[in-house]
């Protein structure tokens, strides 16, 4: 027994020594580890102190970036590489669902800590009416017959007979307020006027429509600022250049829209932090500095938006179109959304952004937008057709439209209360969004009638709208509209008065770099074009081959005329491919010009200049193959003149074909119109009509 006790004591003492040794090793490791962290913190503090001593301009372009080996390095934010940007975004938003809100809160807390107020926009619309006159039936079809009849009828209506068009009311007496920091959902059945309302509020309504009464941003009328730059309208149509990747599409949009007032805000933020001796989070600091630099071909904002929208997995995939295989329909819809979110607009009007998306992706996208709106106090109106219950619950306010009128506008919590006061109840099995879109329909309304003490009768949209004005939520809305917005409370940076986001030269550079990129992507077309004109030159050489062309009689003149006519026609029709290339990109041009991405000349100038080297090579090869072989004048000066004349001709012909494509806007009309134009050109040139 004593022996066993001694063994137990021995084992216990050995165990104690082992535990003590392990504890000692852990303490030593922790001591050295903590001393290492202290050393790193001291090193970071010294580098930050050195940054604080720099001039303001340099300080806004320098930051401390955590390297791959854990060391903190001073970097120029303008020179951040792809891997550095990717690692930074990964640290900030590793898991979108969890980390995006934390990052936005860090962003907002840094601004609030020094007392800077972010610009906000309150949108008001009062007694808004949108009307138009349209043809109905066969007269509305876009045919040649109707086209010419419309022209004649337009002249006759102006002077002689009344118009045969039918009056159509799209929006009728619509009023409301969009508050900053609140998610507003726009619901309504198809053809209820949702898109028209979004376009009217974003300042993008078709001028052909009759628009009356007022829309104001922070109390300012639409003519006092540039609404297309202060707000962003996200269309339900996905119009993109198929040859560009997802990353390139968003990067071009970001480059054209600029950074707004971010640079001025960052300069004031840095000044106040220096005065208060505040050291910001290094990752947030370098993100804000990188996001405030305009004119970048690759922006940190683009990488962040790709991550938020779940497009990072297809960032380097072509967007694609009918002829090019690219991303899926849901991903293309997210590209349309991200194209405007990368800009500095503070009011967002989104039209059917969930089309083609599954419910999970829709929830993730809307939730990310919700976090940004709530934390950074943006203004938003989102149109969704049939949102899922969990997506519906993300919104704070609801606007329900039907037949061009607003049936309800107010907090989401009160919408069922309003319809219960009208005698309708949403069944437990039914989603609230589906109930709201069906309760105003004559076909579906009766199934929701819950007041069994009274017989059911159909309640019109007009009756709903009148009842809402008497409902307590409607009364509050009317009271708020009666009190004008105090313009003195509007932030100076809230509304944009500049027509474009960056300088005209930067826009020209952006359009030129995109055009060169598209030429590289479509290199097969230009190689084929060069091969084609070289082949035509080879054919001309073999048909008219002779060492010397005689000039003795009329027959010799006919040979000259035949050779020159062939050369002229080949040079002219070689530019005909410009029609198809231009028409393919026209929808994107009209969309981006309407968003004030760039002026038309900034798009057209690179389009013309970038083709000159291609035409020089093509005409050079054609000249070498035809001039001396056909037997024209051997004088080298004449050879150069021949080359220059053909070059000018192909440039003029290419411009003519671009004009035909721009006027026609589709291949059928452009080809028909082009045929008559070319016939007129040849007729007036002496080939058909005598001089």
Image (cartoon, rainbow, N blue to C red):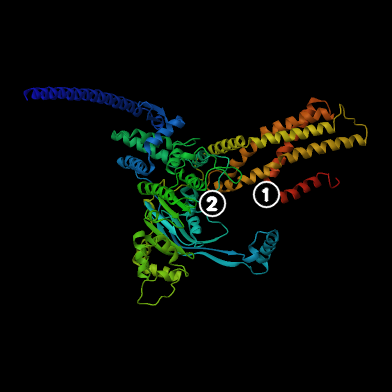
Closer to us: 239 or 329? 329
Residue beneath label 2, please? Answer: 237
In the rendering, at what x and y percent does residue 347 appear?
A: 43, 50
| Quadrant of image for the C terminus | top right
Residue 234, above or below 625: below
Q: Is residue 220 visible?
A: no
Q: Residues within 10 Å of mark 2 (few under 14, many from 20)?
A: few
* Residue located at (40% from left, 69% from top): 448
* Residue located at (35% from left, 68% from top): 420
Horizontal relation, residue 67 to residue 1: left or right? right
**Snapshot quadrant of residue 39:** top left
In the rendering, at what x and y percent does residue 497 appear?
A: 48, 47
Residue beneath label 1, please? Answer: 667
In the rendering, at what x and y percent does residue 136 appear?
A: 61, 66
Closer to us: 367 or 687? 367
Tell me how far mark 1 sits from mark 2, CA to CA. 21 Å
What mark, if any, has residue 479 been given in the picture?
none
Taking the view exactly as shown, the residue that stands out farthest to the right is 553
In the rendering, at what x and y percent does residue 299 appear?
A: 46, 36
| Quadrant of image for the N terminus | top left
Q: Residues within 10 Å of mark 1 (few under 14, many from 20)?
A: some
**Snapshot quadrant of residue 559:** top right
Where disc 1 sits, the SS reads helix
């Amino acid at each position: 027994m004593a022996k066993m006790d001694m063994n137990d004591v021995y084992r216990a003492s050995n165990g104690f020594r082992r535990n003590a040794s392990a504890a000692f090793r852990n303490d030593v490791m922790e001591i050295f580890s903590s001393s290492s962290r202290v050393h790193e913190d001291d090193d970071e503090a010294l580098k930050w102190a050195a940054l604080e001593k720099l001039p303001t301009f340099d300080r806004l372009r320098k930051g401390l970036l955590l390297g791959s080996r854990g060391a903190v390095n001073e970097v120029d934010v303008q020179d951040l590489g792809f891997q550095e940007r990717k690692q930074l975004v990964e640290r900030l938003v590793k898991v979108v669902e969890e980390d995006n809100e934390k990052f936005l809160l860090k962003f907002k807390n840094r601004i609030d800590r020094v007392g800077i107020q972010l610009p906000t926009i309150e949108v008001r619309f009062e007694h808004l009416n949108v009307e138009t006159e349209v043809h109905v039936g066969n007269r509305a079809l876009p045919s040649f017959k109707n086209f010419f009849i419309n022209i004649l009828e337009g002249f006759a209506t102006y002077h002689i007979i009344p118009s045969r068009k039918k009056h159509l009311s799209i929006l009728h007496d619509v009023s409301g307020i969009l508050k900053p920091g609140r998610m507003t959902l726009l619901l309504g059945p198809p053809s209820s006027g949702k898109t028209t309302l979004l376009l009217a509020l974003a300042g993008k309504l078709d001028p052909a429509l009759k628009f009356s009464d007022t829309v104001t941003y922070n109390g300012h009328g639409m003519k006092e600022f540039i609404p297309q730059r202060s707000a962003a309208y996200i269309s339900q149509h996905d119009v993109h250049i198929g040859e560009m990747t997802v990353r390139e599409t968003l990067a071009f949009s970001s480059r054209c829209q600029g950074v707004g007032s971010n640079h001025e805000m960052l300069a004031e933020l840095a000044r106040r932090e220096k005065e208060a001796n505040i050291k910001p989070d290094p990752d947030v600091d370098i993100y804000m500095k990188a996001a405030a630099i305009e004119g970048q071909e690759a922006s940190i904002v683009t990488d962040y938006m790709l991550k938020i929208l779940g497009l990072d997995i297809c960032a380097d995939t072509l967007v694609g179109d009918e002829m090019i295989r690219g991303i899926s329909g849901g991903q293309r819809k997210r590209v349309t959304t991200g194209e405007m979110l990368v800009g500095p607009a503070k009011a967002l009007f989104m039209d059917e952004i969930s089309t083609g998306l599954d419910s999970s992706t829709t929830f993730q996208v809307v939730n990310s937008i919700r976090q940004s709106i709530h934390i950074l106090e943006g203004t938003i109106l989102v149109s969704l057709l049939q949102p899922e219950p969990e997506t519906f619950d993300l919104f704070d306010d609801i606007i329900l439209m039907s037949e061009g009128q607003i049936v309800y506008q107010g907090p989401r919590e009160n919408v069922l209360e309003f319809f219960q006061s009208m005698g309708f109840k949403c069944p437990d099995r039914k989603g609230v969004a589906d109930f709201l879109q069906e309760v105003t329909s004559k076909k579906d309304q009766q199934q929701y009638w819950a007041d069994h003490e009274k017989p059911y009768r159909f309640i019109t949209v007009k009756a709903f709208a009148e009842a809402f004005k008497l409902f307590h939520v409607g009364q509050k809305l009317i009271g708020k509209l009666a009190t004008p917005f105090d313009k003195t409370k509007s932030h100076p940076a809230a509304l944009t008065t500049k027509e474009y986001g960056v300088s005209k030269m930067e826009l020209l550079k952006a359009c030129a770099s995109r055009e060169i990129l598209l030429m590289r992507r479509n290199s097969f077309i230009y190689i084929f074009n060069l091969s084609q004109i070289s082949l035509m030159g080879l054919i001309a050489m073999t048909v008219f081959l002779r060492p010397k062309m005689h000039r003795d009689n009329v027959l010799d003149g006919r040979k000259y005329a035949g050779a020159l006519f062939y050369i002229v026609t080949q040079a002219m029709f070689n530019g005909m491919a410009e029609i198809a290339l231009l028409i393919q990109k026209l929808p994107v041009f009209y969309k981006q010009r309407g968003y004030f991405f760039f002026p038309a000349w900034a798009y057209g100038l690179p389009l013309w200049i970038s083709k000159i080297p291609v035409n020089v090579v093509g005409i050079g090869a054609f000249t070498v193959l035809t001039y001396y072989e056909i037997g024209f004048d051997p004088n080298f000066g004449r050879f150069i003149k021949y080359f220059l004349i053909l070059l000018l001709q192909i440039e003029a012909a290419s411009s003519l074909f671009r004009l035909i494509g721009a006027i026609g806007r589709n291949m059928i009309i452009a080809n028909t119109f082009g045929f008559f134009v070319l016939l007129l050109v040849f007729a007036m040139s002496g080939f058909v009509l005598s001089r």
